[in-house]
Structure formats: structure tokens, C-alpha cells
Image (spheres, rainbow, N blue to C red):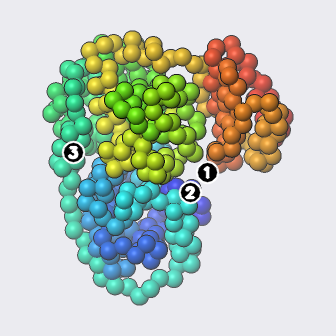
Amino acid sequence: MAGIFKAYDVRGTFPEQINEDAAYKIGRAVAEQFKPNKVLIARDMRLSSPVISIALIKGFVDSGVNVIDAGLSTTPMFYCIMGKHDYDFGIMTTASHNPPAYNGMKFMKRGNISINHETGLNKVEELFKKNKFSKEKEGSIVKKDFRHEYSEYVLSFAKNIPKKNIVVDAGNGMAGYIYSEIFKKLGVNAVKLNFELDGRFPNHESNPLLPGVTDQLKHAVVKNKADFGVIFDGDADRIFFVDEKGRDVLGSIIGAMIAESFVKEKLEAIVHDATSSRIIRDKVGKKGKVIRAKTGYSYISKALIENNAIFGAEVSGHYSYRDNFFCDSGIISLLKVLEIVGNRKFSDVLKDYERYYNSGELNFEVEDKEKVMKKIASHFKDAEINYLDGVTVEYPDFWFIVRPSNTEPLLRFRLEADSEALMKEKVEEIKKLINNSS
């Protein structure tokens, strides 16, 4: 069970790291640390999720906590239920986009505040390790199906949705359980791929950022002459787009499109993660307030709440909304993009946002991450340097970020430049610098 507590969630392989015993103790530890009266528990379709969820619920019940068991759920549906019903605490059993052998948990307390090591997860870990809990009490369990309520909630965001033909890949994840009803009521013609729930992910992995995962979607978009395609990850909080030509669309570009749509109406604050493209700043900066936050959903959520921001964007496909209890939602993001694109071609809309050349995320195995980051900052000392999340180095015609992974001995690197030639040149320069420093 070592190492299952990460920076902002719990994650590990089943049953070696996460199992019934670990889940039970997490329930007891959360109950002792946060002292909730009523807790919401939901889960994804992974093969290990039912037994983990049962053990987690028992941990709460034995602590005298009353449990609302929502059963199968997307993570955004879980967030919505937490926001609408104002439960004291909630845990979503999911490993999101990780391979089938993994499982995990996402934590939230009243006010839809994500729990990470800075907001109490470290205390839960301490109690978990001590494994000494107060005398058992007796809580209650109530099972509830929130699917219809959630579908009606999502549809309340549907405004000026055109009659588009799209392809939707649920990846055998939770999107297939929830969204069929929504598409039917929207009147959108959706060609559905991999909508059958299957925690083995038989058709492709549940992480759309991995090479080859979107190939099936791209082929279907072109074959069906669709207006565009989307793919969800395992718990359906993240969404990724391909245009009508089957080309990948960067998460930052979708973020810029949605952000700009909000500030066109009135001055608003927008949050983006530290790795996001300059295009968001370009599109929003003169019309609204742009706030840069550390990479990671819990940090984006915190910045949204603190600044009462209307929207938050992450390169990784998370898009969060003030009107959605400051939480992310893949399906609401799809509705926003449908509205923005309207009756135009998706590729025509994208032209206004395809301004920069991006390296994508590159990873380097590094033993002393701090040493390498200090050397990089020293090498580019004439640049504008920021330490919000690792090291960000900015010049007028290019910028890059090098930041430590929260879970692995890796440095994550991303660079963006005004031209493809400059992007390639600087990537090679910095790759050599990192390799010669480690």
C-alpha cells in the first residue's frame, strides 16, 4: 500500500497497492480527519471499483457516518451532485485515464473544494498509516440514482446548439453510461464509438493523450464526413477534439475558444494552467483578467474559487466552470464548443487560434530535478523567469516550462514558439542542456 497517496488524489494498482483493506482504512481516516455527517460515494466502471467502493462505504459506516451511495457515475456527475446537494464530503472511486490495473480516489469537501496535500490529504495519509481509529459506531447507507437529474442539469447549459453530425468515442468508460440520453435530447446526430462499459478498455487505452488512442476516432470522423469528433477519458471529466479533417486540436486552443466566448459578453477572470499556450492570454488579456495557476486540477479549482473566475482551462483537457460549481465537465465543454462553432466548419474556426508552434510535452528522467531546474534558470538569466510551477522561461518569440512530476522521477518540458523552425531549434538546445545536467 506504499505510495498510494499522491499530490491531489489516491492512486495505485489493484490489489497490490489499493484493495479492500486500504479502502476501508481511507474511509475511517477521512471520517476522523473531516468529521462529516453525510458523505457521497460514487464509482467508475473499473473491474475493481465495486469492491473498493463497498469497503470504503463500510469504513464510513463503521465511523458513524451516513453514506449516500450514488453507484456508477462520471466524475463531473459526482461533482454536480456534491454541489447541488451540499453534502459534507465526497469520494469518487476512479483511476481516471490510468490503465485497467489501476484504481484510485478523488476527494472533495463541502463547497466543492478539492482535497489535496495542502488541504488535508496529508492528514488523511497520517491517520491511514497509524491505523488507530476510534470505537466503531453505526452509520446508514442510502442508494440513489442521480442520472436523470444530472442529464437535466447538463441540458440546462445547451443554448443555440446547431444540428451537427459528430463522432463521440466514450472509450468504454463512464461517458457511455451517462451521455446517450443527453445526445438524444439535444438532437445532435452522434456516431457512438465504444459506449459499452468495460473496465478492461478493450479497444484502446483510456488516456486520449497517448499515441494511437484517437486513431479510431479520426478514422470514423473522416469516414462519416462528420463535423468533428470528441473522445472522453475513463471517468469522462476530460475531453479532446479532432476537427472534420481528423486532426488533433490542442487543449489550449479549445481553452482559448471557450475563454474568449465568455469575455466577449463582459469583463471576467479566466484561469489557465502553467503549461497553457499564449493564445489564451492573447485572446483574453485585453478583455478580461488572466490568472496563471500551478498545473493540476485541484490548483485550478482553488484559483477559480479564490478569484470567482468564470472559466478554467488545462492543456490536459480539463475545462472548469463557475456555473458548474467551479468544477470541470467534458460534456459541458462539448456543448460550449458546439455553440461557438455554430454553422461554420471547425477547421475554419481553428485558424484564428493556430498562431504558435508547440512541442507537446516531453519527459526526461532526472535524479536531481531541483539541480537541473536551477541550471536552466541560470542559463537563460536574460529571460523573464517565473517559479510558480517549476521554471518558466519567457522571451518575446518563444517560451518554455520545465516542471517536476508530482508522481515520477521526471522533468516535464513544453516549449512554444512563433515559428516551427525556432521551436525545433530551441527544443534541441534545451534537450541538450537537460541531458548534460542530469
Residue drawn at (46%, 48%) of the image: 307
Earlier sequence position, callout 1 versus callout 2 = 2
Q: Which residue is mark 1?
A: 407
136 shown above or below 201:
below
Amino acid type at mark 2: Lys
Residue at 32%, 46% in the rendered image: 324
Report if the CB atoms under discs 1 and 2 are less than 8 Å apart. yes
| Residue identifier under label 2 | 6
Dot placed on the residue nearer the N-terminal end, 3 or 1: 3
**Residue 153 - label:** 3
Asked if residue 335 can be seen in this view, the reply is yes
Write the residue at 16% across / 27% down. 187
Q: CA distance from mark 3 to mark 2?
A: 32 Å
Asked whether 256 or 132 is in front, the reply is 256
Q: Amino acid at mark 3?
A: Tyr
Pointer 3 local density, CA inside 10 Å: few below 14, some 14–19, many at least 20: some
